[in-house]
Structure formats: C-alpha cells, structure tokens
Image (cartoon, grey):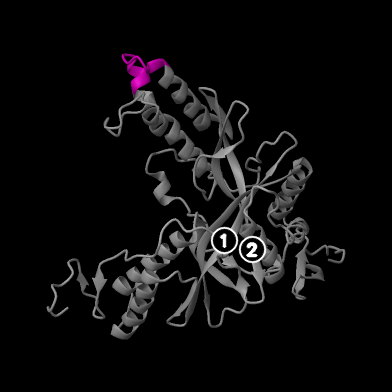
Amino acid sequence: MRSCGGREDGGMSEAGTGADGRLVVVRVPVEPVEAAMEADALDAAVRSSGLVVRGPLFGVAAQSASGGRQWRVVLEVAHGCPQRARDALNSLLWFRAKDEAMNPAERRALLAAVAQLEKECVDELTVLGTRYRVVRAEEYAAIDEHGDIETPRPTDPEPLSPDWSPGAGADSPQVDDGLVLDPDAPLSPLQAAERLSLRSLAYSGIRFPEPVLHDSALAVESHPDVVLMPPAFLIVERSGTESWTPGSGLQATAHDARRTLAFALTWMKPRTRGLIPYDAEPEIDAHTVAAENTSPAAAELAVFADAADQLRASRLNEVEAHGTVYRIGRARRLLRWGPDGPETPRPSDINTHAPYPLHPRMDENGTVYFDEPEEGDEP
C-alpha cells in the first residue's frame, strides 16, 4: 500500500491496491472519537508482542441480488463448528416459513431449503433471491511480552450506567447484530496496516494435522484478502503457570463479559465446585450463603462474592479468586475474502454432528405437525 497523506477535512486519502487488485481506501480520522480510537489502537500495537490464534468460528452471512460486494451477518460468527452454523440457518429459515412467509409459494421455497439443510452439509444456498453462506472466521487476540491477553481498550463501547441485574443480558446487543461486511469500506491507517499484515496469516507447526496446514495455506491463495470484524469480548482464565483458557463465549461489549463473569463467580462456580447444591433455589448464590454465615462453605463463597463485588464497583478487567485469575479478554476475528466473497468452511474443519431435522414438519399452508402421520394417512 502506498503511503497516505491525510486531509485536514478528514476526507479520503490516497488508496493502495488490495490483494485482488482492488483499491484499499484509507480514511485519516480527525473526528474526536475516531481519533481517540486510532490513538488507542496505536497504543495497543506498541504494547503487543504478537498474536495468539484460538481457531475458527462460523456463522451465516447473506447477500441480496443488489448487494454488490457487501454481505450482511444474519447469524453471529461465533459458532464452534460449521454444522452448528448450518443448524442455526435451518432454524432461521424454518421460523421465517412459519411466521413471515406471505403465501404458500414463499413457504415452499423456505421449506425446501430447510429440507436440504436437514440432510446435507450445505454451505451456501439461495432462497427467495437472498444468497446465504456459512462463513468461516479466524479468532485471535493480541498478547503482550508476558503472554497476557489484551483487555478492553478505553474507547471500546461501554454503557453509561452499567446494568448488573440478572435479566439485563436479554436487552444487550448481540455479537454481530446488524453487521455489514464490506471489503471496500474506508479504513483508518492502523486498520489498513493490520488488515495488510494479516493477509499472510496461516497455521504452522507440528501440532496441526497435515490436512489443516494444507487447507490453511490454500486459503491464503484462494482468499487472499481479509476483512476485520469488530472486537468482541470474553472471559479467559489462568491458574498458576498454566496458559490462558477461554471461560465463556463471545460478548458484544466488555460490560456483558463482566456481567457474565460476575454471574459465574456468584452462581455457577459455587455449584460446579460443590459449595452450593445444583438443586438449590435459583436465588441462592455466593452472596446469600456467605451473608448467612451458617454454611461450612461460607468462607470460600465469600471469596467469590468479593471478586464479583470488585467487578461491579470498579469496572475491572481482572480479578482473582481461589488461585484462578479471571480476565476480560479482547477478541478479534478476521474473515478471509476472495473474488466471490467470504470464505466458507474448509474440508479439514471438524463437525461435531451430522445434519438432522430440528423442527416439526410444516406444510405449505403453515400447519405444523407435531406428530408424524401414521403410514397411509394423509398429511
């Protein structure tokens, strides 16, 4: 990419050439919020000593006939295997047939796609003029010189008034909600630098099977460009000298991850460690038992409760309880991009299960049959 000179009005700078010969437009940020985010990104780049790659995640993107090169994420790119993303697409189309189809013809088209997904490992299909594709992203995170995973940045989105109530998560934004994937969108200088530097990312080392290494090298050639997705957040854990391990799925904001961690510390961890019975009433947690101080486990539970209280009081990104450090990690994802759009699952990606019917049978009129008809009966 050629060097870019920013304009004082914040307009577009010179454009470099992408891996597929298309222009990469770089926009120099001058608005205060954009400039602060770029400064944060620069500070993070200085602190970073490398990247750790967790592995692939899968979701579903859709493209309309007039969408150009843009794709819209319709099912979050957060599923651990391709078949889970296909199952999610199966459900999406089934409920569209049930609740949104305007006539029997539309419902037939949707149900035909559902039937295909029930029997085959389908990574792309077109239904009612919309092209659906199971897409593959690489999840990674920056680490510092000590091997510690990056935490949220000051300019990452945070609620003005954090809601810690148990049901608050239902109203929180979902990962990738409304996300449009646009390989031609203008980038900030640091976004462009990161995107260019990650084009050559591929698996290496003896711990990967040969088919995985082969597919990874082939993807660099077949999908030479990358599109960076917005950051997401998760809990990572480390005990003693062990490596960091994931402790949750991806969340849209750091606060959502903190709230998830607070729940884990006060409700889930006590139950998995046998400090509170699994069949205890839902409202019983580390706080209630520690406050009563009548249980032999009260002292241990007080440690969990105190860690959760620290999270709530100070918007911390790291706490420790019983020898385990819990951190809010900042995850990043990239989609490899080729001439026909985002990459689909690779042959070496592992499915945890085969396709199968997920929902009751439905006819073209929208009638749902919860019991299969007896042989010879009319449907």
Name which residue lies at 70% across and 65% down: 220
Residue 142 visible in the snapshot: yes
Vertical side of 287 occupied by 131: above or below:
below
Q: Could you say where residue 33 lies in the image, as x and y percent from the top left? A: 68, 52
Magenta segment: does it hold 295?
A: yes
The amino acid at mark 1 is: Ser
Q: Amino acid at mark 2?
A: Asp
Label pair 1/2, CB-CB below 8 angstroms: yes
Residue at image location 34% in from the left, 65% down from the top: 356
Cα distance in 3D space between marks 1 and 2: 7 Å
Q: Residues within 10 Å of mark 2 (few under 14, many from 20)?
A: some
Q: How many marks?
A: 2
Q: Residue 20: x percent and y percent?
A: 74, 74
- Residue 49 location (% of width, % of height): 76, 42
Q: Position of residue 35 (x, y in %)?
A: 74, 53
Give the number of the disc on residue 348.
Answer: 1
- Residue 184 visible in rendering: no
Q: Is residue 66 above or below residue 306?
A: below
Ranked by sequence position, the earlier of labels 1 and 2 is 2
Q: Judge left or right: residue 212 versus residue 191.
A: left
Q: Say left or right for 120 vs 229.
A: left
- Start-end of magenta stretch: 289-299
Quarter in which the C terminus is drawn? bottom left
Q: Secondary structure at mark 2?
A: helix
The residue that disc 2 covers is 215
Q: Is residue 98 magenta?
A: no
Badge 1 crowding class, 10 Å Cα cut-off, few under 14, some 14 to 19, many 20 or more, is: some
Vertical relation: 95 (above or below) 268? below
